[in-house]
Amino acid sequence: MTRAAAGENCYDVVIVGAGVSGCAIARELSRYHMSACVLEAEEDVCCGTSKANSAIVHAGFDAATGTLMARLNVEGSNLMGTLCEELSVDYERIGSLVVCTDEAERDGLEALLARGRANGVTDLRIVERDELRALEPNVSEAAVAALWAPTGAIVNPFQLTLALAETAAVNGVEFRFLSPVSGVTRVPDGLWELATAAGPVHARVVVNAAGVHADELHNLVCAPDDRLEVAPRRGQYHVLDVTAGAHVRHTVFALPTRLGKGVLVTPTTGGNLLVGPTAEDIDDKLGVDTTADGLAEVVHKAALTVRGVPFSERIRTFAGLRAHQPGHDFVIGEVPGAPGFVDCAAIESPGLSVAPAIGRMVAGIVCELLGGPAEKDGLLPRPGPVPDVARLGPEEWSALVAQRPAYGRVVCRCRTVTEGQVEDAIRRPLGARSLDGVKRRVEAGMGRCQGGFCSPRVAQILARELGVDLRTVTLAGPGSELAAGRVKDAWAAAAGEVAR
Ligand SMILES: Cc1cc2nc3c(=O)[nH]c(=O)nc-3n(C[C@H](O)[C@H](O)[C@H](O)COP(=O)(O)OP(=O)(O)OC[C@H]3O[C@@H](n4cnc5c(N)ncnc54)[C@H](O)[C@@H]3O)c2cc1C
């Protein structure tokens, strides 16, 4: 079915949610001749849990053997390196260590090793105290052994989600932002009708990739005895400056507990040190605030596995929400009794790691439901990545400046990001529309001063590029405007009040 034949607001498939899951699915579906649209509540790609996590590509030893989570984790981990290379996404296979600090816990380590092997993770082994110290000099004095997983990796989650989305967009998938889906009903002709503020959108197949809100959409279409419960499980973090990034060489986990993988200490692909997360069951699906208690807990727990974490180098804290369901497994597939409504729900950790596998799996389900659409000749590549001047040598940078002088005007001093890069972030397919959008794409504002110096300049560039009034530029979409008005106008109004 083409869009023209079916009407402007009718698609073969609509994906709800532009997180890493929705974007991975969109990219896979863009390989086929079909009309597809992504409806996203927020103003940009990667605004939900996909922007607030540990950014680890888990090797796959953690999930219970035989679960969908375990299978997709190993598959995703195996696919991730090649995918990131293809998409020019920062990815480093640095390996991970699960540290045991008490001989009495060694059974837990052995169990993890056995589970990892049963899940199909390769090259796993236990390293003893001396080898562990050589691998990770700052490991806790109390460490007695660790599970070494060389296939563990780190990835840039913003770049990954954006690259998947951009590729999908370049290959014909439409993205509509600020489009929360508020209702789902079955209508004649085998279609689903999705209610949005801009009017109804129709689809033959709906993919529910709505993160912590996926249960709400599922429960609109399911049988009464098939309701889904997705509860937000919050994780809080400290981000340390790049000066602390080399404190550990690998991702260092504590042995997992009933509540999750425990606090980890890891370098990021951007060179920072990330320490967290907590695991708190909360009620609020918007509850991404941090708390003094949560952050203190992270400091305390980090010291159990890594010594001397330099928290004085902290530049930011944040929290993300895991989409936890009681069965602790992903819920992927057509909802019974709701033909053409496909869940990609309860994608909690390791949801980032599994994204390549989820993309393939859900696209397969959708294609089958659509009767096997014809495949295109291949995917058109997205435009090349924005040049990263901070990683260029002086000669390469000069050559770039000669091409476009804007690459010579540094806007963000902490991360060395230039006006040219900010312009590129805005001009790309699905380009940035807010300060945070620019930050996710080119890291302006991600450094030590956290945008203190560059935000006004980035806002000016946004206003100029988008052709809007500076006062309408936002941090992260409507309601987060940077300016309330002109100071002179406020003074004039106040003076008028006084005169009256
Ligand atoms: C603390 C923490 C640490 C983690 N660490 C890791 C890790 O190291 N490695 C790993 O592999 N995984 C990790 N994860 C898990 C991983 O981040 C998630 O599984 C993954 O990002 C989920 O992606 P998603 O696309 O399913 O959901 P999201 O990224 O949340 O995207 C869902 C999107 O749907 C949109 N949406 C919701 N409702 C509607 C609606 N009604 N209409 C339109 N749009 C809607 C939202 O705005 C959002 O953009 C972690 C998660 C947390 C919270």
Image (tube, rainbow, N blue to C red):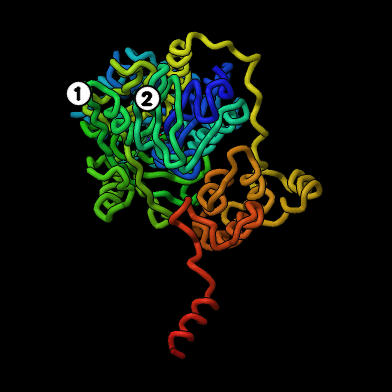
Q: Secondary structure at mark 1?
A: helix
Q: Kindly identify the amino acid type of the residue bearing the numbered disc 1.
A: Pro
Q: Position of residue 403 (x, y in %)?
A: 80, 46
- Which residue lies at the image location 47% right of the left edge and 39% below the top edge? 46
In the visual, does 353 lie left or right of 286? right
- Which residue lies at the image location 67% right of the left edge and 34% below the top edge? 384
Q: Secondary structure at mark 2?
A: strand
* Above or below 201: residue 273: below
Q: Which residue does the numbered mark 2 point to in the structure image?
A: 344
Image quarter where the N terminus lies is top right
Estimate the spatial distance between the alpha carbons at disc 2 and disc 1, rounded to whole Å.
Answer: 19 Å
Asked whether mark 2 lies closer than 8 Å to ligand 1, one says yes
Q: Nearer the viewer, residue 172 or 259?
A: 172
Quadrant of res 55: top left
Q: Nearer the viewer, residue 456 or 154?
A: 456
Q: Kindly identify the amino acid type of the residue bearing the numbered disc 2.
A: Cys
In the visual, does 418 lie left or right of 2? right
Q: Earlier in the sequence, mark 2 or mark 1?
A: 1
**10 Å crowding of disc 2: few (<14), some (14-19), many (20+):** many
Q: Nearer the viewer, residue 355 or 214?
A: 214
* Above or below 290: residue 82: above
- Which residue lies at the image location 45% right of the left edge and 57% below the top edge? 480
Residue 114 visible somewhere in the drawing = no
Q: Which mark is residue 224?
A: 1
* Above or below 236: residue 181: above
Question: Which is closer to the viewer, label 2 or label 1?
Answer: 1
Ligand 1 picture quarter: top left
Q: Position of residue 320 (x, y in %)?
A: 35, 42
